[in-house]
Each structure stands twice: as structure tokens, then as C-alpha cells.
Image: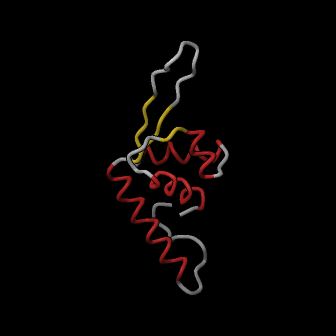
Amino acid sequence: MTVPLERVLRAFLDDPAAPRYGYDLMKVASLQSGTLYPLLARLEQQKLVASAWETPQQEGQRPRKYYRLTGEGIRVARLELARASRQQRAPGHPGRLAPGSLG
């Protein structure tokens, strides 16, 4: 699992039911848009994240695209973060998850 992915999953799991928009995730996860949006697109392709556009409240307001973890996304995120935490505590940990994991 990459550090950016871990940061995004942790941000989502702070309140799994709450939809998050891109700029908010960028701030919370301390990521640039060029890192965040491809990651969100990959998670959406894997059906771990769902997205929807909001209806602007005022004329001329730009709509936001909101993202949220799916039920499967919540399950996988918790599992992968727990696995990453165990591996980080293991002696000689190289800093990344094994090939074939979520990252």
C-alpha cells in the first residue's frame, strides 16, 4: 500500500458514511490533485469508492463531485490498514505491503 493510498483510506474511515469532495480529501490527506484524482479513479474502478455530483445551491456555483467508500470499500480499507499497521510493527519492515495487495 502506498502512503497516498493509506492517507486517503484513513480520511474516508474518519467518518465512513460521510461523502468527501476532492479538495477536502486533498487537504486532509496532504496530497496534490495529480496524485489524488488518479487514486480515486482507480478505487472507483475497483468499486471501492462511489461518486456523485452535487446539485449547486446557488446559480453560478460550481458543482462538487463527492466520493464515499462503498460497503466493500469500507471492509477492504479496514482490512488493508490493519494489515499495513501489523507489517509496520514487524521487525525489518520494508515500508510497503506485499505485491498483490490493495496498493
Q: Give percent across and percent down for residue 77.
A: 42, 59
* Front-lying residue, 14 or 86: 14
User: Up-down: is 12 above or below 3?
Assistant: above
Taking 33 as reference, is 88 left or right? left
Q: Residue at x 54, y 56 (%)?
A: 5
Colour scheme of the picture = secondary structure
Farthest residue to the top: give it: 59
Q: Which residue is drawn at 46% across and 66% down?
A: 81
Left or right? Give the position of 99 relative to 28. Answer: left
Residue placed furthest toward the bottom:
91
Where residue 99 sits: x, y (%)? 50, 68
Q: In this view, does 69 lie above or below 96?
A: above
Image quadrant in which you'd find residue 79: bottom left
* Frontmost residue, 46 versus 11: 11
Query: Picture coordinates of residue 56 (x, y %)?
Result: 49, 20
At x 46%, y 40%, the residue is: 67
Question: How many numbered marks does the figure carry?
Answer: 0
Where residue 28 appears, as percent x and y from the top left, is 60, 50
Figure check: 98 above or below 2 = below
Say which residue appears at 51% left-offset and 61% top-offset.
103
